[in-house]
Image (tube, rainbow, N blue to C red):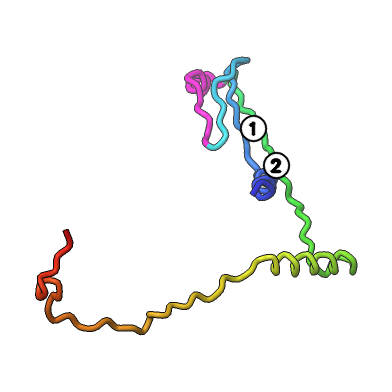
Amino acid sequence: MLLALLVLFSTVSFTVEKHFCGDVLVDVSVFADVEKCAMEAMEMKQKKSCCKDEVEVVKGQDDLKFSSFEDLDFEQEQFLTAFAYSYINLFEGLPKQIIPHKDYSPPNLIQDIQVLDEVFLI
């Protein structure tokens, strides 16, 4: 499980967007667009720009090595085969449970024998 999470996080890429108004950091966003400040709306009218956006791209690993059983040398193949065979044979199957009364059907009760003979437990 740990190795699967390690591979997942090493291959994930994401971007970090930052919006500066002058030298002041206004907003940072990882998954959504950054919010623009009110100064930028006024700058559109004045044609001057004191705001800037920075985008940092964190790239994940793209080249993963895929190897197959045939890429191993003979000793490694032999060890892996012996290990898998011995590991599978560690587990023993459960014995088949025999139910002796599986096909037995009880007799039909017509009357309650205890009431008929007036025998009661005290």
Q: Residue 34 location in percent, x, y?
A: 53, 30
Q: Residues within 10 Å of mark 1 (few under 14, many from 20)?
A: few
- Magenta span: 32-47
42 in the magenta segment: yes
Q: Secondary structure at mark 1?
A: strand
Q: Residue at x 66, y 43 (%)?
A: 9
Could you tell me which secondary element the residue under label 2 belongs to? loop
> In this view, which residue lies farthest toward the top?
23
The residue at which mark 2 appears reads as 59
Identify the residue shown where x is 42% and y is 80%. Answer: 100
Q: Give the camera-side residue of 85 and 73.
A: 85
Horizontal arrangement in the rendering, residue 86 relative to residue 5 (left or right):
right
Q: Which residue is mark 1?
A: 55
**Alpha carbon distance from label 1 to label 2:** 13 Å
| Quadrant in which the C terminus appears | bottom left
Task: Describe residue 33's horizontal placement relative to residue 90 as left or right.
Answer: left
